[in-house]
Image (cartoon, helix red, strand yellow):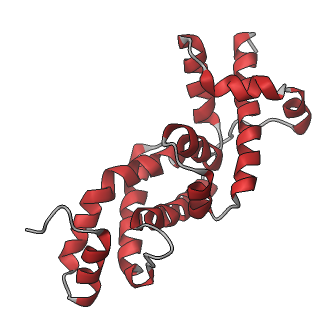
Amino acid sequence: MRQCDETDQQIIERVLYHGHGADYALLVDRYGARLFAFVVTMVTRREDAEELAEDCFVKAFGRLGEYDATRSSFYTWLRCIAYRLCLDHVRRQPVVWLDMDEQTLQAVPDKAAELVMDAEDDRRIRLLTEAIHRLPPTERLLVQQFYFEQQSLNDIAEITGTEAGTLATRLHRIRKKLYQYIIMKEHGK
């Protein structure tokens, strides 16, 4: 039995250079639940998320020699792979997501949009949750990672391959969408 305090790099080296392929299961055990939680943010059907998380580990195992610990953590590298797998999956799904035209978004006051994520009463929290689930998967992931997982924009940029400044702009627009959705629902529209 291996030590729990081994680094990812030690396990990876054993798998790659010493023929201990079965030790890859240690990484699956270490990151399986977290990766599933990441995937289910983009792919809401549990069955699809389970399959995609498994596919991610299989793909990562096949590309393990490409992993570069000087560029990112193993978990960040896994999320990069998972993100791309999820994008491919959701692009094939015929779903209509919450979207609003530019004029509607421009009408939302910046200050009001900034406060939308600070909802405290039960009705607003329920509406906010509902609105987040209706966002396109990439936007839902951005909200989840930034607000709930408290990942930095730089970390999210690493995963998505998008500049941190661009992500900040997207978050601003997403908050406006969420605010507008809540206001529409509160007024019975």
- Residue at the image point whose x is 65% and y is 45% from the top: 139
Out of 177 and 151, give the one closest to the viewer: 151
Position of 56 with respect to 142 (left or right) is left
Residue 116 placement: quadrant: top right
* 104 shown above or below 75: above
* 150 shown above or below 188: below
Count of labels in the image? 0
Residue 23 placement: quadrant: bottom left
Out of 168 and 130, give the one closest to the viewer: 168
Residue 92 visible somewhere in the drawing: no
- Residue at the image point whose x is 84% and y is 33% from the top: 105
Where, quadrant-wise, is the N terminus in this rendering?
bottom left
Position of 131 with respect to 177 (left or right) is left
Out of 41 and 144, give the one closest to the viewer: 144
- Residue at the image point whose x is 65% and y is 38% from the top: 135
Q: Residue 51, how many percent across, how many down?
A: 39, 57
Q: Residue 158, how many percent across, how many down?
A: 58, 63
* 67 shown above or below 53: below
- Residue at the image point whose x is 86% and y is 37% from the top: 101
Residue 28 placement: quadrant: bottom left
Q: Residue 8, how many percent across, how many down?
A: 30, 69
